Image (spheres, rainbow, N blue to C red):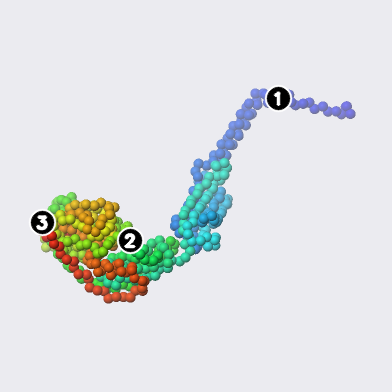
Amino acid sequence: MADNLVVYKPMTSKWKLYWRGPGSLIFFALLAVVCLGAFIWLGLAHLDKEAPWVNLQPPGEVVGSKTAFTLEAGDPDSGLKEAKVTITQGPVEKVVLNRQFPPGAAPGEKMELPFTLEPQALGLKEGKARITATVKDRSWREWFQGRVATQSREVTIDLVPLNLSFLSVNPLLHAGGTGLIRYRLSKPAKESGVVIDGRFYTGFPEPGGPQGEYVVLFAIPRETPGTVMAEVTAKPGEGPPVVQRVTLKVKPRRWRQDRLNLPENFLRRVAADFKLNPADPLAGYLQVNREMRKANHERLHQACSQSKPQPLWSGSFQRYLGKSMARFGDRRSYFYQNRQVDQQEHLGEDLASLVHSPVPSANNGVVVLAEPLGIYGDTVVVDHGLGVFSQYSHLSQIDVKAGEEVKKGQVVGKTGTTGLAGGDHLHFSMLIQGDFVDPLEWWDPHWLRDQVEKQWQQPGAQLTPVKAAAAPAKAGKSKGKGKPVKHKRPLP
């Protein structure tokens, strides 16, 4: 047994020499460099610089009974790992889309994931909800969990179709005048109103009326063959608008024709006031009378784009006590040296009384514009609610400012000759959401009571065509003491 005994010598001393030798330092240094390089390589590959991105299309805020969406997402460095879409309503959260990657979603690749949201199938109800889209990349960021991008959006679930019912229209409709239509909606709409001659007029909740009933005042075209097509329209949160077409009987009008001569001294004054080329005052005047007029009307549309949702007026609109110098709707032909050079419509009433006479507000309201306005000179515009506005132009002095509340009869300024005025006077206009209408109607207490205010005080009824009555009579002339105006024919 002893001859076969193999004795193993311990290796401890040999290994100790190896570990303690100079080669050990080199070995460990190389090993550390390799490990560090591998770590850096892995870090650069998986600790990317850019986060993922996500976008939910389309961007609407309403979800119908069946609404299609597309989730767009990507990551430029490591690529996507997963994508998820949820919808939350109160304590209920439902998963709409859940996708894991790979396959697909490589670095830099844009993913488009279509899906359809059906709220009723998920047990959701009409009302507010929140859609949340979340994507995660494959990076080692966030403790190896990956970077996250989220897009969240408040939406309204709309499951019941929108219904629209025409109720009534005021019976006396005149070309260039004001119309009023009442209608009923089964539920609130994104927007509703009436389209007349391609122009949309916003509806407002009926004053003192039941919930769901609306009124809309609109400008009747100045040129009409006797009928006008009105489209009562309501736009739901999703889908096409609901439209009901109604044919309105309108009494046409024959507008006055007016000839205006342009004297040299007036053209020179206009050139000086508007800083035009004095060498050709006629060309400068025509540019003002055409291009500036158009820009001024666009400014008025902008100023009248927002109105109080309830009537602010009380009783009929007060007429400035002055002599009528020009009428609403006059067709003006401009002549220079016996040659016709231009033609425009006069879209207000020119009233002249005393030089620098105080101008009262026609009714209660809120000032929305108080500034110089090109051809109209210094101008004040007052909002009377429900899209009704009054305009006071050619003022020599403005006594109110935008945002100020005014009462009927309160002085807003003084008459003057600013703008394209040929003499001291007030240019007064009435506008419906920025479109000019005949002021004579609004000065008439019977018309205002019967054709406007009584319309929303009666029960709804289907339209029955009514023969239009004659146009309102002219308002009275002014009286007063003081320095009289030399009544030149005003020009704008």
**Relative image position of residue 167 (x, y in whole percent):** 36, 71
Residue 406 seen in the figure: yes
The answer to which image quadrant residue 12 occupies is top right
Q: In the rendered structure, which amino acid carries the disc numbered 3?
A: Lys
Please rate how many residues cluster around mark 2, counting C-alpha atoms within 10 Å: few if below 14, some from 14 to 19, many from 20: some
Disc on the earlier residue, 1 or 3: 1
Q: Amino acid at mark 2?
A: Gln
Q: Residue at x 29, y 72 (%)?
A: 171
Checking the image for residue 483, the label placed there is 3
For label 1, the SS is helix
Q: Which residue carries the number 1 mark?
A: 16
Residue bearing the label numbered 2: 310
Indicate the position of residue 301 as horizontal and vertical percent values: 28, 58
Rounded to the nearest angstrom, the CA distance separating label 2 from label 1 is 98 Å
Q: Give the left or right position of residue 400, taking residue 152 as reference.
A: left
Which disc is residue 295 wearing?
Answer: none
Count residues near mark 1 (Cα–Cα under 10 Å), then give few for <14, some for 14-19, many for 20+.
few
Q: CB atoms at circles 2 and 1 under 8 Å apart?
A: no
Give the quarter of the image for residue 490. Answer: bottom left
